Image (cartoon, rainbow, N blue to C red):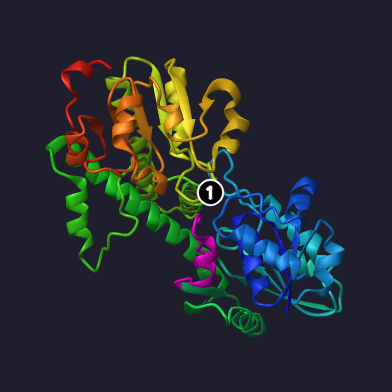
């Protein structure tokens, strides 16, 4: 089968590369020459474990091709996936301008006969109907087009695995030909098939992300209770998570959710609800708790650390990605800079992206230990594996004061106490600072 993906972000590039690896011919259409040139050379632009190797393999086999020219890719394609961004507008609603622009451009190049156009972008209910209207308006009379919604559920950091092993493959369409075509294309991929209408498929993605965000905010809400009462949030949530009706996955306390999906999709769902005259206070509460998670953690630091030299481990919103969109690190760093703190940071993948934004406002280290020297505290914001079994003696020796703020609860409080650290995590008892480090 010949396939085209319009857009080469996480969704477009990862899915295109996996489908090429199945033996399909896959075109990827972009509009930035610099990025396309890098992709043609096997540089995936984004950091995603295993993607570079898989991309280079399929480039060598001539199964994946990159272009900015719609007239090369679209006419020979059986399936065209729209995988462009739908970033939030200032009010929180999804910006669909790229989706509609792409629909108009690709529609003019659809070949005579049947072509399926499937939207992988996360879009509000009714968007695919508008896409279909645009396509039918601009296509040739000999072209037959059907529209489907096929949302993705991959996680950054494990995107290739998730593409190959999804929990479900959602296909929404009013066209049997479209459904059959997508079932054929997804045949090598595991996961339960969910066949539904367009509106349901569009809403499934938003609902899924809103539920995940809710679990994170719920865990953080409980962490607030734990810090006020002396309870241990990990013990509480471990016990709650044993209940099969609830589960522990995604119910992790910390400095809040971020990334390209959860923040924008929850806010977009709020806007969709408001447009339908639905009370969205529940979802607004999820967003509010996420904001409180960040501010509460930041206030712990401001209240304890008076000597304004700080080291930070972790900038990306989660491990195994270089994605910094809506990362909690932004909020924290901006607050600390505003208060006059000097900041040194280390992240295995995301520092180049941060340098583009902060330049010389913060210092960037080459390794985790290098940023610690003479810092008054270490702040951990991303749970990268390389942070989980570090040399605690070495950390204590390098830091000016043995103070750690752990925003992801990666260490055990008792272990940190035994090493003599002043240790502040989320929803667990703080380890009282040794006398010599009071007012650090």
Nearer the observer, 304 or 417: 417
- Main secondary structure found in the magenta portion: loop
From where the camera sits, is residue 272 visible?
Answer: yes
Q: Secondary structure at mark 1?
A: loop
| Quadrant assignment for the C terminus | top left
Q: Quadrant of residue 302?
A: top left
Residue appearing at x 49%, y 51% in the figure = 320
Q: Is residue 160 magenta?
A: yes
The spot of residue 216 in percent (x, y) is 34, 50
Residue appearing at x 47%, y 77% in the figure = 191
The spot of residue 281 in percent (x, y) is 36, 47
User: Up-down: is 348 above or below 269?
Assistant: above
From where the camera sits, is residue 296 visible?
Answer: no
Residue appearing at x 59%, y 31% in the figure = 355
Q: Is residue 112 left or right of residue 202?
A: right
Which stretch is magenta? 152-167
User: Up-down: is 4 above or below 332?
Assistant: below
The spot of residue 110 in percent (x, y) is 82, 71
User: Up-down: is 1 above or below 393?
Assistant: below
The spot of residue 183 in percent (x, y) is 59, 82
Nearer the observer, 220 or 368: 368
User: Up-down: is 197 above or below 177?
Assistant: above
Q: Is residue 73 left or right of residue 176?
A: right
Residue labelled with disc 1: 260
| Quadrant assignment for the N terminus | bottom right
């Amino acid at each position: 089968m010949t396939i085209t993906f319009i857009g080469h972000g996480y969704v477009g590039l990862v899915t295109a590369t996996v489908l090429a690896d199945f033996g399909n011919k896959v075109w990827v259409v972009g509009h930035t020459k610099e990025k396309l040139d890098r992709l043609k050379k096997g540089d995936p632009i984004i950091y995603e474990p295993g993607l570079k190797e898989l991309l280079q393999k399929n480039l060598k086999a001539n199964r994946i091709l990159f272009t900015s020219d719609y007239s090369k890719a679209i006419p020979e394609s059986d399936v065209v996936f729209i995988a462009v961004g739908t970033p939030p507008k200032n009010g929180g609603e999804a910006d669909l301008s790229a989706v509609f622009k792409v629909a108009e451009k690709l529609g003019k190049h659809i070949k005579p006969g049947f072509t399926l156009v499937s939207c992988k972008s996360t879009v509000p209910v009714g968007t695919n109907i508008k896409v279909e209207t645009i396509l039918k308006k601009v296509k040739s009379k000999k072209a037959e087009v059907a529209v489907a919604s096929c949302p993705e559920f991959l996680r950054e950091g494990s995107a290739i695995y998730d593409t190959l092993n999804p929990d479900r493959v959602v296909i929404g369409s009013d066209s049997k030909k479209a459904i059959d075509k997508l079932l054929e294309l997804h045949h090598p991929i595991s996961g339960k098939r969910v066949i539904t209408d367009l509106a349901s498929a569009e809403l499934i993605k938003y609902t899924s992300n809103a539920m995940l965000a809710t679990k994170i905010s719920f865990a953080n809400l409980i962490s607030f209770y734990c810090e006020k009462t002396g309870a241990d949030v990990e013990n509480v949530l471990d016990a709650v998570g044993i209940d099969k009706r609830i589960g522990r996955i995604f119910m992790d306390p910390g400095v809040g959710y971020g990334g390209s999906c959860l923040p924008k999709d929850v806010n977009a769902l709020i806007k969709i609800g408001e447009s339908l005259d639905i009370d969205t206070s529940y979802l607004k509460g999820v967003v509010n708790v996420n904001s409180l998670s960040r501010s509460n953690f930041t206030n712990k630091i401001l209240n304890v650390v008076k000597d304004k030299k700080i080291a930070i481990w972790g900038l990306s919103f989660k491990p195994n990605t270089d994605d910094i969109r809506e990362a909690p690190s932004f909020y924290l760093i901006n607050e600390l800079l505003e208060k006059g703190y000097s900041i040194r940071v280390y992240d295995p993948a995301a520092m180049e992206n941060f340098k583009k934004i902060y330049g010389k406002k913060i210092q960037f280290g080459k390794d985790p230990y290098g940023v610690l020297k003479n810092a008054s505290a270490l702040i951990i914001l991303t749970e990268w594996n390389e942070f989980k079994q570090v040399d605690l003696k070495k950390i204590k020796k390098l830091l000016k004061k043995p103070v750690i703020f752990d925003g992801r609860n990666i260490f055990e409080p008792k272990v940190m106490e035994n090493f003599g650290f002043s240790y502040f995590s989320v929803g667990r008892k703080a380890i009282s600072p040794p006398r010599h480090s009071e007012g650090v």
